[in-house]
Every structure is written in C-alpha cells, then in structure tokens.
Image (cartoon, grey):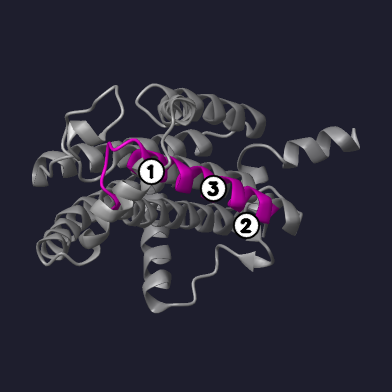
Amino acid sequence: MATKGRESQDHGVRGEVRQDRYVAGQDLTRWKSPVGQLMAATAQRITTFLGPYAALVITLVIGLLISIALVVTFGEVYESVTEADGVAGLDHPVLDAAKSFRSPALDAATTAYTNVGGTVGMPLIAVGIMIFLATKRKSWTPVILMLAAGLGSLLLTVAGKPLFGRTRPDLSDAIPPFEHSPSFPSGHSLNSIVIAGIVAYLVILRLKSKRARILTIVIASVFSLTMGLSRVYLGHHWLTDVLAAWALGIAWLSLVIMAHRLYLTVRTRHHQEAAS
C-alpha cells in the first residue's frame, strides 16, 4: 500500500508539484525579478478562468509570436553581418576545411547521421520519447511541451527560409542528396537543439543525481553540436546558418522552459491552497 501511495505521488499533477519543482536545489516556482513575478501573477489570473493547461498554451503562443519577431530582427542583424563579411568570413574557410576531411566512408556515415535530424528521423524520435514520458508520468505536460517545442522550431524554420532566401553552398561543394531550399536558418540545427534541449529538460526534472544531470546535458549538447556541424561538413549549409539556428533554437527553448515554469508555479500554488 505504501508503495502504491508513493507511486501515485510520482504521477500526474502531484508528481509535477512534488518532483519537478526543484532542480539542483533551485525552486523553479520562485521568481526573483519583478518581471517574473508579474508573469507569474498574470498566469495565476489566467488559470483562474481557463485552467492551468490553457495558461500554459497561451504563454507558449505568446512566446512563439515573440520568437517569430526575433527571427525577423535576427535576420536583419544577420544580413548586416554577412554583408560586412564579419562572422560570414568564416563560411568559406570552414567549408574548405571540412572538405579536406571527406572520405567515402565518412561521407556515408555523416549522411546517415544527419538523416536522424531530418524531417522523418527527428519527428519519430520526438514522438517516441513524448509518448514514453507522458505514459510514465501520466501527464499531458510532456506532450504539450514537446509538441510546442517541435512545432515552434519548425515554424521558425519555415518562416525564416523564404524571408531571407540565402543561397546554400554550391552543389559542387556539397555531398548528395542535394537540398535546394534556402539556407538560412539550418532546420536540422534549429530542430535538433530544441528537441534535444526540451527532452534533456524534462529528464533532468526527475533526476536526483548531479552526475546524471550533467551527463544528460552533455549528451544533448553533443547531439546538437554534431548535428549542426554535420550540415557544414556535407556542404548543405554555411557555418553562419548553423550558428544562427543555434541562437534561435536556444531563444525558443528558453521561452518554452519559461512557460513550463509558469505552469508549474500556478500548479504548485493551487496545490498549496487546496492543502491548506
């Protein structure tokens, strides 16, 4: 009976309030800045009328609108940098360096690896992990967060490519199969860092060991890093496309995590009020 009671506390809303609130001794429901406190109070009021999941979804939608605006702003800065030959001055030297490492075996291995982060591989992996986490925790939160993270990163990619229409490296410098969509931003790089990041975040919420948390972060970081660099190695993207995608991905991931913190805050406060 005691085991069943403990298991029930690990699932659903009780599990979220009991286990997800603290990470490495930090209380995710505490907002020290005035802006954070204002957002938490606003989320609390929305929850009163629409419920906690509605508050989470509304926060994510607002965050997505902010991210789209960020894409436009970032693109303007990006164009200025490339026109001034700043960071973009690394594009050709880095591609030339990548070409010097190519071999038939490494080309095939890298192509297979980059397919994992493509339009088929990444969704399959994300859906599998999402179903596992939602089932294990008996909660819709992993579903909402992972769908929001994945669909948001996809929308940012789709919105960014035609907006700036940057040309990819010449086909003579690329390894087939060739891609012909605009180069900015790198979809593989953006999607991989967002999906790997949100999975790592959800896993870390339930990890008690510092070593396990560090290992999770390292695995997610290495996956995102190598996925982005594989695009440069294959000649499918310029280095600056990858760097831009990483920056946009981190920004969107941060907003998704912030939305979850707000959701967790209102859940915790409601739970405390019900218990008192």
Q: In this view, does 209 lie above or below 184?
A: below
Residue segment shown in magenta: 213-239
Disc 2 + disc 3, Cβ < 8 Å: no
Looking at the rendered structure, the kind of residue marked 3 is Val
Question: Which type of secondary structure does the marked residue at label 1 adopt?
Answer: loop
First in residue order: circle 2 vs circle 3:
2
* Mark 3 crowd level (few <14, some 14–19, many ≥20, 10 Å Cα): few
Task: Report the mark closest to the observer, 2 or 3.
Answer: 3
Q: CA separation, marks 1 and 2?
A: 48 Å
Q: CA separation, marks 2 and 3?
A: 27 Å
- 90 sits to left or right of 193: left
Looking at the rendered structure, the kind of residue marked 2 is Arg
Q: CA separation, marks 1 and 3?
A: 22 Å
- 172 sits to left or right of 220: left
Label drawn at residue 21: 2
- 8 sits to left or right of 186: right
Q: Is residue 198 above or below residue 250?
A: above
Q: Can residue 32 be seen in this view?
A: yes
Looking at the rendered structure, the kind of residue marked 1 is Ser
* Mark 2 crowd level (few <14, some 14–19, many ≥20, 10 Å Cα): many
Identify the residue at image location x=21%, y=59%. Answer: 88
Task: Report the mark closest to the observer, 1 or 2.
Answer: 1
Q: Is 224 a magenta residue?
A: yes
Q: In this view, does 110 lie above or below 10?
A: above
Residue linked to disc 3: 222
Q: Main secondary structure of the magenta part?
A: helix
First in residue order: circle 1 vs circle 3:
1
Residue linked to disc 1: 100
- 58 sits to left or right of 117: left
Quarter assignment of residue 43: bottom left
